[in-house]
Amino acid sequence: DIQMTQSPSSLSASVGDRVTITCQASQDIGNYLNWYQQKPGKAPKFLIYDASNLETGVPSRFSGSGSGTDFTFTISSLQPEDIATYYCQQYNNLPFTFGPGTKVDIK
Amino acid sequence: QVQLQESGPGLVKPSGTLSLTCVVSGDSMSRSNWWSWVRQPPGKGLEWIGEIYRSGSTNYNPSLKSRVTISVDKSKNQFSLKLSSVTAADTAVYYCARDKDGSRKLDYWGQGTLVTVSP
Protein backbone atom coordinates (compact mmCIF):
# COMPACT_ATOMS: atom_id res chain seq x y z
CA ASP A 1 0.00 0.00 0.00
CA ILE A 2 1.05 3.58 -0.56
CA GLN A 3 1.55 5.37 2.77
CA MET A 4 0.52 9.00 3.07
CA THR A 5 1.90 11.38 5.67
CA GLN A 6 0.81 14.93 6.49
CA SER A 7 2.36 17.77 8.42
CA PRO A 8 1.66 19.39 10.67
CA SER A 9 -0.85 17.20 12.49
CA SER A 10 -2.52 20.35 13.79
CA LEU A 11 -2.13 24.09 13.54
CA SER A 12 -3.64 27.27 14.91
CA ALA A 13 -3.81 30.41 12.83
CA SER A 14 -5.55 33.74 12.85
CA VAL A 15 -8.39 34.75 10.56
CA GLY A 16 -6.87 36.05 7.34
CA ASP A 17 -3.65 34.07 7.70
CA ARG A 18 -2.20 31.93 4.95
CA VAL A 19 -2.25 28.27 5.96
CA THR A 20 -0.15 25.56 4.32
CA ILE A 21 -0.36 21.79 4.79
CA THR A 22 2.03 19.31 3.26
CA CYS A 23 1.30 15.76 2.20
CA GLN A 24 3.90 13.19 1.23
CA ALA A 25 3.43 9.84 -0.52
CA SER A 26 5.67 6.83 0.08
CA GLN A 27 6.13 6.45 -3.69
CA ASP A 28 5.53 8.43 -6.86
CA ILE A 29 1.80 8.95 -7.38
CA GLY A 30 2.03 11.46 -10.22
CA ASN A 31 -0.73 13.98 -9.62
CA TYR A 32 -3.28 11.40 -8.45
CA LEU A 33 -4.11 13.20 -5.23
CA ASN A 34 -7.35 14.48 -3.72
CA TRP A 35 -7.94 16.79 -0.77
CA TYR A 36 -10.96 16.66 1.55
CA GLN A 37 -12.29 18.85 4.34
CA GLN A 38 -14.05 17.29 7.32
CA LYS A 39 -15.87 19.35 9.91
CA PRO A 40 -16.65 17.82 13.32
CA GLY A 41 -19.48 15.30 13.14
CA LYS A 42 -19.79 15.64 9.38
CA ALA A 43 -18.82 13.60 6.35
CA PRO A 44 -15.74 14.61 4.38
CA LYS A 45 -16.25 17.17 1.65
CA PHE A 46 -14.37 16.85 -1.62
CA LEU A 47 -12.25 19.95 -2.39
CA ILE A 48 -9.43 19.31 -4.85
CA TYR A 49 -8.62 16.63 -7.43
CA ASP A 50 -5.59 15.82 -9.54
CA ALA A 51 -3.51 17.62 -6.91
CA SER A 52 -4.41 21.13 -8.06
CA ASN A 53 -7.90 21.27 -9.58
CA LEU A 54 -10.62 22.90 -7.53
CA GLU A 55 -13.94 21.08 -7.43
CA THR A 56 -16.88 23.15 -8.67
CA GLY A 57 -18.26 25.43 -5.97
CA VAL A 58 -15.19 25.31 -3.73
CA PRO A 59 -13.96 28.79 -2.75
CA SER A 60 -10.89 30.00 -4.60
CA ARG A 61 -8.97 30.63 -1.37
CA PHE A 62 -8.31 26.88 -1.38
CA SER A 63 -5.56 25.59 -3.65
CA GLY A 64 -3.29 22.62 -4.14
CA SER A 65 -0.02 21.90 -5.84
CA GLY A 66 2.65 19.26 -6.25
CA SER A 67 3.37 16.03 -8.06
CA GLY A 68 5.32 12.86 -7.54
CA THR A 69 5.65 12.41 -3.80
CA ASP A 70 5.31 15.93 -2.39
CA PHE A 71 2.12 17.97 -2.29
CA THR A 72 0.88 21.18 -0.71
CA PHE A 73 -2.59 22.39 0.27
CA THR A 74 -3.06 26.11 0.93
CA ILE A 75 -5.78 28.31 2.33
CA SER A 76 -4.81 31.79 1.19
CA SER A 77 -6.86 33.65 3.80
CA LEU A 78 -8.21 31.55 6.66
CA GLN A 79 -11.89 32.05 7.44
CA PRO A 80 -13.79 30.93 10.55
CA GLU A 81 -15.77 28.43 8.50
CA ASP A 82 -12.51 26.71 7.45
CA ILE A 83 -12.10 25.17 10.89
CA ALA A 84 -11.86 21.48 10.06
CA THR A 85 -9.55 18.55 9.55
CA TYR A 86 -8.02 18.25 6.09
CA TYR A 87 -7.07 14.93 4.50
CA CYS A 88 -5.06 14.09 1.42
CA GLN A 89 -5.84 10.87 -0.44
CA GLN A 90 -3.95 9.10 -3.21
CA TYR A 91 -5.66 7.24 -6.02
CA ASN A 92 -2.68 6.16 -8.06
CA ASN A 93 -2.97 2.62 -6.71
CA LEU A 94 -5.59 0.58 -4.95
CA PRO A 95 -6.26 0.56 -2.09
CA PHE A 96 -6.97 4.26 -1.91
CA THR A 97 -5.15 5.60 1.13
CA PHE A 98 -5.60 8.75 3.15
CA GLY A 99 -3.19 10.85 5.10
CA PRO A 100 -3.70 11.03 8.88
CA GLY A 101 -5.24 14.49 8.66
CA THR A 102 -4.32 18.03 9.69
CA LYS A 103 -6.58 19.77 12.17
CA VAL A 104 -6.89 23.51 11.54
CA ASP A 105 -8.03 25.78 14.35
CA ILE A 106 -8.45 29.49 14.91
CA LYS A 107 -5.90 31.15 17.18
CA GLN B 1 -29.00 16.63 -6.08
CA VAL B 2 -27.23 13.37 -5.32
CA GLN B 3 -27.85 12.01 -1.85
CA LEU B 4 -26.58 8.90 -0.11
CA GLN B 5 -28.01 7.49 3.10
CA GLU B 6 -26.51 4.72 5.18
CA SER B 7 -28.62 2.46 7.36
CA GLY B 8 -28.14 -0.59 9.53
CA PRO B 9 -27.72 -1.77 13.11
CA GLY B 10 -25.72 0.54 15.34
CA LEU B 11 -24.57 -2.29 17.59
CA VAL B 12 -22.99 -5.58 16.55
CA LYS B 13 -21.67 -8.31 18.80
CA PRO B 14 -18.04 -9.43 18.57
CA SER B 15 -17.54 -12.22 16.01
CA GLY B 16 -20.78 -11.20 14.34
CA THR B 17 -21.37 -9.65 10.92
CA LEU B 18 -21.79 -5.94 10.33
CA SER B 19 -24.36 -5.20 7.61
CA LEU B 20 -25.03 -1.76 6.17
CA THR B 21 -26.98 -0.46 3.20
CA CYS B 22 -26.52 2.78 1.28
CA VAL B 23 -29.54 4.09 -0.59
CA VAL B 24 -28.75 6.44 -3.46
CA SER B 25 -31.07 9.15 -4.71
CA GLY B 26 -30.56 11.71 -7.45
CA ASP B 27 -28.37 9.31 -9.44
CA SER B 28 -28.82 5.88 -10.95
CA MET B 29 -26.65 2.97 -10.01
CA SER B 30 -26.95 1.86 -13.61
CA ARG B 31 -24.66 4.73 -14.63
CA SER B 32 -20.90 4.39 -14.91
CA ASN B 33 -20.00 5.28 -11.34
CA TRP B 34 -18.13 3.34 -8.70
CA TRP B 35 -19.56 3.25 -5.19
CA SER B 36 -17.33 3.10 -2.14
CA TRP B 37 -17.39 2.38 1.57
CA VAL B 38 -15.05 4.32 3.86
CA ARG B 39 -14.81 4.07 7.64
CA GLN B 40 -13.47 6.25 10.44
CA PRO B 41 -12.81 4.93 13.96
CA PRO B 42 -13.73 7.46 16.66
CA GLY B 43 -11.15 10.23 16.77
CA LYS B 44 -9.08 8.70 13.99
CA GLY B 45 -8.54 8.99 10.25
CA LEU B 46 -10.24 7.62 7.16
CA GLU B 47 -9.85 4.09 5.82
CA TRP B 48 -11.11 3.00 2.40
CA ILE B 49 -12.88 -0.35 2.63
CA GLY B 50 -13.77 -1.10 -0.97
CA GLU B 51 -15.90 -0.27 -3.98
CA ILE B 52 -18.37 -1.73 -6.44
CA TYR B 53 -19.35 -0.99 -10.03
CA ARG B 54 -22.79 -1.35 -11.59
CA SER B 55 -21.72 -4.69 -13.11
CA GLY B 56 -20.97 -6.04 -9.66
CA SER B 57 -17.20 -5.81 -10.09
CA THR B 58 -15.52 -5.07 -6.79
CA ASN B 59 -12.20 -3.91 -5.37
CA TYR B 60 -11.40 -4.38 -1.70
CA ASN B 61 -8.76 -3.12 0.68
CA PRO B 62 -6.41 -6.09 1.16
CA SER B 63 -6.37 -5.43 4.90
CA LEU B 64 -10.08 -6.31 5.05
CA LYS B 65 -10.56 -8.40 1.93
CA SER B 66 -11.04 -11.73 3.71
CA ARG B 67 -13.95 -10.32 5.72
CA VAL B 68 -15.64 -7.87 3.32
CA THR B 69 -18.41 -8.30 0.79
CA ILE B 70 -19.88 -5.37 -1.14
CA SER B 71 -22.94 -5.95 -3.31
CA VAL B 72 -25.26 -3.84 -5.45
CA ASP B 73 -29.01 -3.92 -6.03
CA LYS B 74 -29.68 -1.72 -9.02
CA SER B 75 -33.45 -2.29 -8.83
CA LYS B 76 -33.47 -0.61 -5.41
CA ASN B 77 -30.71 1.85 -6.28
CA GLN B 78 -28.65 0.78 -3.31
CA PHE B 79 -25.47 -1.02 -2.40
CA SER B 80 -24.47 -2.89 0.71
CA LEU B 81 -21.53 -3.74 2.93
CA LYS B 82 -21.01 -6.89 4.96
CA LEU B 83 -18.05 -7.22 7.30
CA SER B 84 -17.70 -10.53 9.08
CA SER B 85 -15.93 -11.64 12.26
CA VAL B 86 -16.00 -8.15 13.70
CA THR B 87 -14.02 -7.05 16.74
CA ALA B 88 -13.88 -3.84 18.75
CA ALA B 89 -11.35 -2.55 16.21
CA ASP B 90 -14.17 -2.40 13.65
CA THR B 91 -16.05 0.18 15.71
CA ALA B 92 -16.27 3.21 13.45
CA VAL B 93 -18.43 5.63 11.55
CA TYR B 94 -19.11 4.00 8.19
CA TYR B 95 -19.61 6.22 5.13
CA CYS B 96 -20.77 5.39 1.65
CA ALA B 97 -19.56 7.60 -1.19
CA ARG B 98 -19.82 8.05 -4.96
CA ASP B 99 -16.87 7.94 -7.32
CA LYS B 100 -18.27 9.66 -10.39
CA ASP B 101 -17.48 7.91 -13.67
CA GLY B 102 -14.46 6.22 -12.14
CA SER B 103 -12.74 9.59 -11.85
CA ARG B 104 -11.53 8.56 -8.37
CA LYS B 105 -13.13 11.67 -6.94
CA LEU B 106 -15.32 10.74 -3.97
CA ASP B 107 -17.60 13.66 -4.66
CA TYR B 108 -20.74 12.75 -2.71
CA TRP B 109 -20.85 11.13 0.72
CA GLY B 110 -23.53 9.87 3.03
CA GLN B 111 -23.81 11.39 6.49
CA GLY B 112 -22.23 8.32 8.04
CA THR B 113 -23.49 5.81 10.57
CA LEU B 114 -21.76 4.77 13.79
CA VAL B 115 -21.41 1.05 14.29
CA THR B 116 -20.22 -0.11 17.69
CA VAL B 117 -18.91 -3.62 18.25
CA SER B 118 -19.68 -4.62 21.81
CA PRO B 119 -21.08 -7.66 23.70
Image: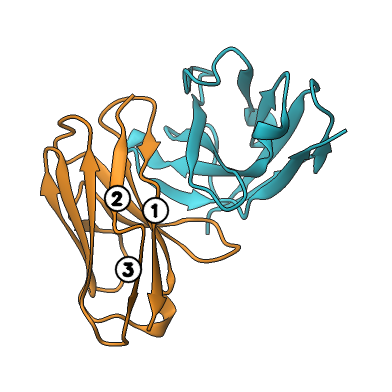
Chain colours: A orange, B cyan
- Residue A6's mark? 2
Taking depth in this image into account, of B18 and B89 the one nearest to the observer is B89
The residue depicted at 54 percent of the width and 56 percent of the height is A43
Residue that appears at 22% across and 32% down: A26
* Mark sitting earlier along the chain (3/2): 2
Secondary structure category for the residue under label 2: strand
Q: Position of residue A46 (x, y in %)?
A: 39, 55
Disc 3 is attached to a residue of which chain?
A
Q: Quadrant of residue A2?
A: top left
On the rendered image, what quadrant is the C terminus of chain A found in?
bottom left
Which of the 4 image quadrants contains residue A11?
bottom left
Q: Position of residue B8 (x, y in %)?
A: 78, 40
Q: What chain does mark 1 sit on?
A: A
Quarter-of-image position of residue B91: top right
Label at residue A101: 1
CA gap between label 1 and label 2 equals 6 Å
Q: Residues within 10 Å of mark 2 (few under 14, many from 20)?
A: many
Q: Which amino acid type is shown beneath numbered disc 1?
A: Gly
**Looking at the picture, which amino acid does disc 2 mark?**
Gln
Measured as percent of width and height from the top left, residue A56 is found at 31, 63
User: Is circle 1 on the same chain as circle 2?
Assistant: yes
> Which residue is drawn at the image coordinates 14% and 36% (left, top)?
A30
Amino acid type assigned to the residue bearing label 3 in the image: Val
The mark that comes first in sequence, 1 or 2, is 2
